[in-house]
Image: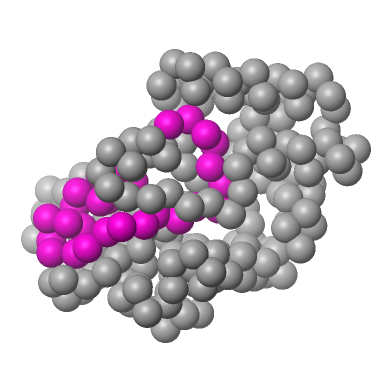
Amino acid sequence: MLDALVEFLLKSNAIRFGLFRLSSGKESTYYIDLRVLPSFPAYFKMAIDALRRKVDHEIGLRDIDYICSVPTAGIAYASALAYSIGKGMLYVRAEAKDHGTGKLLEGYLSPGSRVLLLDDVATTGRSLVHAVEVVRSNGGVVDNALVLIDRCEGATELLASKDVRLLSIIRIDEVAEILHDANLLDEDMLKAIRRQIEYQQRNK
């Protein structure tokens, strides 16, 4: 099922390969936009089912009270997963509003509750660390974060420095290997992605 989902991400342009400039200003051999996936219910369900299995096997439903995401792409996944496992859902704003209550954390959080952070993609981990700090400052307990795809660019290590474990459904190198084995990604691009990961690991 994971292979079918990965192949669909390529066919739907949710993952594209080439040369892209990211919002950080860095260049990348691939681009991921998982905002596309909720438009395709069958494949979106595959993603939510994969997230639920990861929760069941590596965290446990009893150890989660809330699912919390960060805007914007992760909210669709957090909402669907929270609904499917019967947990409350929250989200953390990147910055406080300049009107109303000015809250960073949206939703109701009972103090002492265990919160699983959820996003679509992990890159540097800075937005997830921001969410960790906001949730903890509001009385929540955060030990785990979960993403669909880990770009392997330092998020694991940054979150670990905050005593948070990062789990992923799949890493970008595994995505590339699946596509290569299916003859959907050529050898040169596979090597380029591996070089990019190695470079990021050396320069974290």
Q: Is residue 11 magenta?
A: no
Q: Residue at x 43, y 49 (%)?
A: 166
Provide residue 123's location: percent of width, then percent of height: 46, 36
Q: Is residue 138 above or below residue 96?
A: below
State how many labels appear.
Answer: 0
Can the viewer see residue 188? yes
Magenta range: 127-154
Q: Examine the image and state in which quarter residue 27 appears.
A: top right
- Closer to the camera in the image, 56 or 23: 56
Provide residue 63's location: percent of width, then percent of height: 35, 73
Q: Is residue 146 magenta?
A: yes
Q: Examine the image and state in which quarter residue 83 appears.
A: bottom left
Provide residue 52's location: percent of width, then percent of height: 54, 70
Quadrant of the rendering where the C terminus is positioned = top left
Q: Residue at x 53, y 69 (%)?
A: 57
Q: Is residue 153 above or below residue 88?
A: above
Q: Is residue 45 above or below residue 22?
A: below
- Closer to the camera in the image, 169 or 17: 169
Q: Examine the image and state in which quarter residue 203 appears.
A: top left
Quadrant of the rendering where the N terminus is positioned = bottom right
Q: Residue at x 86, y 40 (%)?
A: 181
Residue extending farthest to the bottom is 86
- Give the image's coloring scheme: one colour
Q: Residue at x 63, y 38 (%)?
A: 172
Can the viewer see residue 90? no
